[in-house]
Amino acid sequence: MITIPPLGSSSSSPRLEVVPEVTPVVDDDEDVVVLVLVLVSRGSVVVAVLVVGMGESLV
């Protein structure tokens, strides 16, 4: 996990956490990279999930 500490000493400063995960699909030749971005700012939590598929089909 890659954690970027807040710039200021205040707890309201934005914090970005990147949690990359590599999950194998049914076929051994195909992999799916799931990148979860969690942004905590001003008490609100924004979660962005990016799925990058390498292969013809994810099903």
Image (cartoon, rainbow, N blue to C red):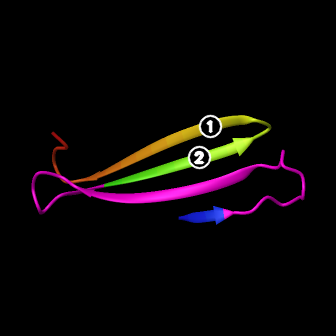
Q: Amino acid at mark 1?
A: Val
Residue 30: give x, y in percent of width and height. 17, 58
User: SS of the residue at dot 1?
Assistant: strand
The circle drawn on residue 38 is 2
| Residue with the most extreme right position | 9
Q: Position of residue 38 (x, y in %)?
A: 59, 46
The residue stretch that appears in magenta: 4-32
Task: Find residue 6 and report its horizontal and vertical position in percent.
Answer: 79, 58
Q: Residue at x 55, y 57 (%)?
A: 18
Alpha carbon of mark 2 to alpha carbon of mark 1: how far?
Answer: 6 Å
**Position of 19 compared to 7: left or right?**
left
- On screen, residue 39 versus residue 48, left or right, reads right
* For residue 28, side relative to residue 20 (left or right): left
In the displayed image of the protein, which residue is found farthest to the left?
27
The residue lying furthest to the bottom in this view is 2
The residue at 16%/48% (across/down) is: 56
* Mark 2 residue element: strand
| Residue wearing tag 1 | 46
